[in-house]
Image (tube, rainbow, N blue to C red):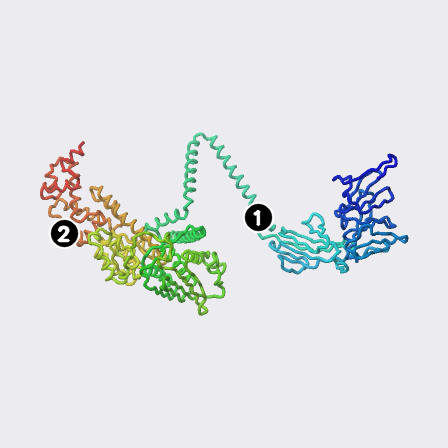
Amino acid sequence: MFDTEQESFISFKENNDTNSLSNNNIKSLYYSPGNILWIGTNGGGLNALDLNSEKFFHFTVEDGLANNVIYAIMPDSNGNLWLSSNKGITRFTKGSNLEASPVIVNYTNYDGLATEFNTGAYYKDLEGNLYFGGLDGFYWFKPDEIKANSILPKTSITSLEVLNEPSPMKKGLILGHTQNTLSFTFSSMQYALPEKNHYQYKLVNYDEDWVYVGNNNFARYSYLPPGDYELLVKSSNYDGIWNETPARFAFKIAFPWYWNPVTKLIYIILFLWAMYGVYSYFKWRWRMKLDLELKDEEASRLQKLNDFKSKLYTDISHEFRTPLTLISGPVDAKLSEGSLSDRDFESFTMIKRNTNRLLTLVDQLLNMAKLEKGKLSLKVKEGNLGLFIGAISSSFKLRAAQKNIDYQIKVDKLQICMYDEDAMEKILTNLITNALKYCPEEGLCKFNARRENSTVVISVKNTIENLSEIEVDRLFTRFYQKDEYAEGIGVGLSLVKELVNLYRGEVSVRIEDHNMIHFRVILPLERELFESVEILNTPEVNEKLTGLTDKVALNKTSSAVSKKTKEKLPLVLIVEDHKEIRDFLKSAWDKKYELYEAENGKSGVEKALEIIPDLIITDVRMPILDGIELCNTLKTDERTCHIPIILLTAGQGEENELKGLQSGADDFITKPFKLKILEKRVENLIETRKALLSRYSQEIILKAKDIAITPTDEIFLNKVQRLLDEQLSNPDFNAASFSRNVGMSRMQLHRKLLAYTGLSTTAFIRSQRLKQAIHILQTSDASINEVAYSVGFNTPSYFIKCFKETFAKTPSEYLQTTSK
C-alpha cells in the first residue's frame, strides 16, 4: 500500500498473528466503499483490511465458506460479494460491521455449477451480470434474479429402531429399561436437491442444546437412562431456510422393577429403619455407659460379662469357617444318644438331612471350582472296578423300591482296571441319583457297565415324563433346571461332564423310544492312557480278585495269609443281602481285617454268636431278619452286647434310624457310602474299644459303669464282679468254671473278655488275682504267703513268679518301692 503523506509503500505479510494476512499468496483484490480492501488468498480464505485502522479480518471455511481458495471477488448492486473457489461460488453478505458474523450462501455443483473456477476469470457487465470462468467453461447470472426457496420443509420423523430392530412409532410408546438404545431417521420431505437439506435435533431431558448434523438424517442414542423423553427435529430446504416448528415424538423408558417409585419408597423406609436401629443401638450403649458410671458395684460384673461376650463372639466367629461341621457334629451326638422322643428325633434328623444336603452341594461347588482352577487332578490306581461299580449301583435299590421303580443292574467283570475311586464315585452317584429323581413311579431304570476294548462304557437309562419340556442340549449346563419348581440347583450333571473331561472320557445324552432318556459315559481303563503323575504309587490291594465272586475263592484268598497274622487282625462281620457290597468290602479290607459274612439278619446273628466279632456292619433292610432286629437281638444278649454295630441304610427313613439308635446301634452310614469314611468309622469304633482296655488296666476293681457301653454290658460286668468277689480266693476257680457260671461257652467268654480287657479268660483271672494281691499288700500286714493263698494261688512260689512276670518285681521289692 502507498502512503501519500509519507510517499512510501507499506507492506503487509503473513506473520502468524490475527492482525496480518492469513496467506501471502493473493489470488484476487477488491476495494469497496467504506475504505475496505477485500483480499482473496490461496488457502487463507477471504481477508478484509480496514484501511482506516489497518486492521485485518479473516473469513474461512470455519465461518461458512465453501473453500479457502478465493479466485475472484465481485460485488453486486445490493452490496453482496460473489466469490469463486475450488468448490463453486459463494455469496458473501457482510454484517453491520466487519466484526459481525456475515451471511454466507454456497452454490456448488448441486446447483449446476462447475466444481473448480480459474484465477482472474471473472467479469461484470454494465447490466449487472456476473461472469465466472471455470474448468468446464464460463457461467454467468444476474444476482437479482437468484431467489431463495421460501417454501418451508415439512419435517417428519420417519422410523425408529430399538436395539437395532425396527419398532412401531405409536403414541405414548413405553419401552423397558433394557430397551434403551434407540435410532431415529427423519426427513424434510423436500426431494429437490435433498443433499442440501440440513437437520437439527434435540432430545428433551437429555440434550442441553440443539445438535446440528448437516445433511445427516440419522440420530442414535445409547444407554438412555429411564425417564420421559421427546425428540424434536428441525430441517431446512436446500437454500438454508429453516422450519422452526419441529417434528415431535414422545416416548418413555420405564424404570426397572427395583428402582420404581414403590421400591424407592421401600428403600427409604429401610434406610430410615436402619438409621433408627443405629440410633437405638448407640442410645443403648450410652445408657449402658451411664449405668456403669453410676453403679460402681456392678462395674466389675459387667466388665466380666462383657469380656465373656467378647470371647464368645470371637470363638463363634472363628468357628464360622466351618459352620456346617459345627451343626452336624452336635446333631450326630444327640442322635447317637438313642433316648430322644419321636418328635425330637424327627427334628434332629431333619437338621442332619439338610446339613448333609448342604455339605453335598458345597462339595459339588467346591469340586467345580477346583476343576475350573485346575487344582483337581486324577489319582488312579489298580483295582476291581466291577466290584466298585456294583457296590455303588446296588446302594440305590432301596431308593428305587420306594418309588416302585424297576431298577435293573448289569455290571461286567472288570477285575484289573485303572480308575480314580473319588471321581468314579461322583460320576456314578450323580448319574444314578438324577435318573431315579426324574423317573416316575412304577417306571424303569437300567444301569449297565461293560468293557469295550480299553474303556468302560457306563449306560444309565430311565423313563421320564414330559420330555418336551427338557432341553437335552442344556442338561450338562451348570444351574440348568427345566422349570423354576425343579429340585436341586443343576450342578450334578455339570460336575459329571467336568469330571469326565478331566478323565479324558466322553459323555453324551439322547432320547430313545419317546419316553426314555439315555446317559452314556466312556472312560479309559488302561495304565497307558493316564499320565504318570496321575497314577498312585501305592501297593495294590486287589492283585487277584477273580476268586472273590464266591465263598470258596474268598477262603482260598484268606488262607494265603498266615494264621499268625490273621489271629492278630480284628474280626469284622459283614451282614448284607447284596453280594456286590459284600464282595467289594472284602476286596478292600481282606488284608486289614479278618472278614466274615452273612447274607441275612438271621444268619448274621448266628455267625455273631459263633465267632464273637470285634465289629459288625449290617444293612437295615434284609430278608428274614432286618438290621434293626439284628441290632436289638445282639445288644440285649450278654454274649454280644459289647460288639459295636454300624447300620447301613439306603433310605432317609427317620423311623428306621430312631429304631436303630434305640436298639443300641453305634453308628449310621447312608448308602451310597464312601469307603474311606466307612473305614475310618470302623477304625474309630475299634480304637474306642481299645481305650477301654487301657482304662481296665488301671483299675483294681472292675467298674462296670466305667467300662460298659450298653445296659446289658453293665449287667454282665456286674455279674462278673460279683463272681470274682465270691470265687477269686478259690484256687479251683478257672476258665471252665468261669464260663459255666456266666452261662457262656469258653470261646464266647474268651472273645468277650478280650474285647473288654484284651486278656484271655485265664489271663484275666490271674490279672484280677494279682490286682487284688497288690490291694491286700498295701492295706494290710499280711505276709506274702498269706496273700498268695487269699487270692487263690496254690503255692506262694507260683504267686511270686506270676507277680514278677507281671510287675517286674517280687512282692517284697514292690512293697519296698511303694513304702518309699
Identify residue type, mark 2.
Ala
Circle nearer the viewer, 1 or 2: 2
Categorize mark 2 by other alpha carbons within 10 Å: few (<14), some (14-19), many (20+): some
- Up-down: is 57 above or below 446? above
Q: Position of residue 805 (x, y in %)?
A: 15, 42
The foreground one among 415 and 234 is 415
Residue under label 1? 266
Q: Determine the secondary structure under disc 2.
A: helix
Q: Earlier in the sequence, mark 1 or mark 2?
A: 1
Q: Quadrant of residue 24?
A: top right
Q: Is residue 154 left or right of residue 735?
A: right
Identify residue type, mark 1.
Ile
The foreground one among 18 and 103 is 18
The quarter of the rendered structure image containing the C terminus is: top left
Can you see residue 509? yes
Q: Determine the secondary structure under disc 1.
A: helix
Categorize mark 1 by other alpha carbons within 10 Å: few (<14), some (14-19), many (20+): some
Residues at discs 1 and 2 in contact (Cβ within 8 Å) = no
Can you see residue 343? no
Q: Which mark is residue 203?
A: none
- Up-down: is 819 above or below 763? above
**How many angstroms separate mark 1 from mark 2 (CA)?**
85 Å
Q: Position of residue 716 (x, y in %)?
A: 22, 50
Q: Position of residue 457 (x, y in %)?
A: 38, 63
The quarter of the rendered structure image containing the N terminus is: top right
The foreground one among 108 and 693 is 108
Q: Position of residue 3 (x, y in %)?
A: 86, 37
Residue under label 2? 736
For the view shown, which residue lies furthest in the bottom direction?
513
For the view shown, which residue lies furthest in the right direction?
126
How many circles with numbers are drawn on the protein? 2
